[in-house]
Image (cartoon, helix red, strand yellow):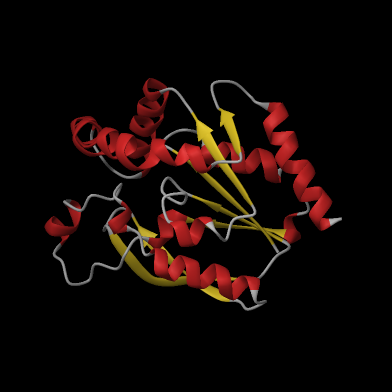
Amino acid sequence: MLIIGIAGGTGSGKTTVVHQIMNELPQTEVGIISQDHYYKQTDHLSFDERALINFDHPRAIDFELLVHHLKELKAGNTIDQPVYSFVTHNRTDDTVSTHPRKVMIVEGILILANPELRDLFDIKVFVHADSDERLIRRLKRDIAERGRDMDEVLNRYQNTLKPMHQQFIEPTKAFADIIIPNDKYNTVAIDVVRAVINQRIS
């Protein structure tokens, strides 16, 4: 199994890059795991307490479960991925049954910050985008998809997202095998990743 880690700041365009890579690959042979579903369970906290969690700090991620799940997939076993709700800031009771594939793509802002997880990746990709561009994308997404208002998003960006990006996310660029600048459609970098995948699954 080929495991590809795709990291980058919030709103950097990781999802777009994932779709571009997958576009020309057989869907049955490629699976995706998103770090977003591996935020720790917070049943013991009230909604107001959960809303105060710093979700951009590595502490918020259940890396242990994510590493365990990847190892299980590598061993040929099916896993039950948790499902996370950004509306309630907690895991739901649902899970997604995920079968082993020839290629697993793991995407998320902090996936290169954890050494054990990093060691499982055959290819490490970092998607780089200008900070203004990332803020605009984050604003649009959080207002449209996560029921936030503009002040809330901007406050969170200033007080949490930006400092966390500088402290934990940007430095992980050093671990990447390929850095994809997402200021324009970067066909060369995408083609390189795709070529490696095709080699593995052909």
Position of residue 94 in the picture relative to residue 2 (left or right): left
**As displayed, is residue 68 above or below residue 10?**
below
Q: Position of residue 171 (x, y in %)?
A: 40, 38
Total of numbered circles in the picture?
0
Asked whether the viewer can see residue 96, the reply is no
Q: Is residue 171 above or below residue 22?
A: above
In the image, is residue 22 above or below residue 162?
below
Residue 166: % across, % down: 32, 34
Q: Is residue 81 left or right of residue 57?
A: right
Q: Position of residue 186 (x, y in %)?
A: 65, 26
Residue at the spot x=52%, y=39% of the render?
14
Q: Position of residue 55 (x, y in %)?
A: 28, 50
Asked which quadrant contains residue 9, the reply is: top left
Task: Name the residue at 28% across, 40% down.
Answer: 164
Q: Nearer the viewer, residue 191 or 18?
A: 191
Camera-side residue: 172 or 140?
A: 172
Point 34% across, 43% down: residue? 168
Residue 183 placement, left or right of 167: right
- Residue at the spot 34% in from the left edge and 66% down from the top edge: 91
